Image (cartoon, rainbow, N blue to C red):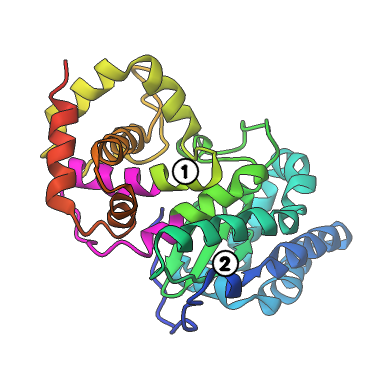
Amino acid sequence: MLGLRASAQSPRPRTTADSLRIVWADVDHFWQAYDRLATARTTADSLAIIDTQYLALATPGLRKYAEAAQATAPDWLRAIRTHRRYLAAIRPAMQSVGQQQHAIRQAARQLQAIYPAATFPTLYFAVGKFEVGGTAFGDALYIGAELKCASPQPPLAEIRPELRGGVSAVSTVSTACIHEIIHGQQQVRDYRTNLEGAIQEGAAEYLAFRLTGRLGATAAFAYARQHEAVVRHQFAEQADQPIAAQWFLATPDAATGQPGALGYFIGFRICEAYYDQARDKKLALRQLVALNDLPQLLAAGRRYLAQP
């Protein structure tokens, strides 16, 4: 999740799953503007189309993203021109995002069932400039549809290598949404070590999997399940060091071939063990949502990392 910041105030959070708002007007506006670009004769024409047909119609979610990313029409035009094949391939999938409403709402209801105090932001789906899959701006949750609403096997040659592992199919977007919503419930935000970061991301990933039946960081999990002892040992050596991007970004290691985001897997396994060993399962789930039992989770993490 990219740490973009917005200065504008957001609307109040939706406090129940049934009142969750899901907005994808920006996706519709993007494709309308995209089609109009075919009529542009000059770069100035293209920029005017993006400005008037997309950015001028922006929802609060897209406006906050554009402000935080300091992005303007030339940035979108550049992104479109450098991702032509990719955009053409994923267009049908991206335009079907509205069909995922039921899955997103169902996951939100299940979250509220295990954590009644949950609050829910407005979800805004928009097309950014290929840099972030999801990030929160106060009580608005921005989802980058160009990365999180793709087709099952999109062409990735035009995608920057560090982002390829974060591209996911629209059919799994409920997992991405609920993962980010769970982050909004977590009470401890000042994570400094790799182990603390793994628990933060792993808790959201573990709970999202329980609620949707799907994983987000699929490449990391596929690799780590086959090499768990090795990954665990590598992580254990750096567990108490300051948070390192290699464990949490989707960028693969060019030298070893290891996928990125392996910290998500480590955290998932720690939270899974924490739940399995808990006597009060309902309480354990609530504690995983809120992360209000961090000392016990850290202890569970050290037990996991101590395994041979």
Q: Is residue 148 magenta?
A: no
In the displayed structure, would residue 30 be above or below residue 275?
Answer: below
Tell me the residue at 54%/39% (across/down): 213
In this picture, residue 41 sits left or right of residue 268: right
Corner quadrant of residue 256: top left
The residue carrying mark 1 is 210
Residue 215: give x, y in percent of width and height. Answer: 50, 37
Evaluate whether residue 272 shows in this view. Answer: yes
User: Secondary structure beneath disc 2?
Assistant: strand
Q: Nearer the viewer, residue 151 or 85?
A: 151
N-term mark: 1 or 2: 2
Corner quadrant of residue 129: bottom right
Question: Residues in magenta?
Answer: 180-204
The residue carrying mark 2 is 123
Residue 251: give x, y in percent of width and height. Answer: 41, 34
Q: Amino acid at mark 1?
A: Arg
In this picture, residue 192 sits left or right of residue 38: left
Q: Nearer the viewer, residue 282 or 142?
A: 282
In this picture, residue 120 sits left or right of residue 268: right
- The chief SS type of the magenta part is helix
Residue 248: give x, y in percent of width and height. Answer: 33, 41
In the displayed structure, would residue 119 be above or below residue 43?
Answer: below
- Distance between mark 1 and mark 2 Cα atoms: 21 Å
Tell me the residue at 77%/64% (across/down): 28
Tell me the residue at 72%/50% (across/down): 94
Judge depth for marks 1 and 2 and give the one in front.
1
Q: Amino acid at mark 2?
A: Leu
Evaluate whether residue 242 shows in this view. Answer: no
> How many numbered markers are drawn?
2
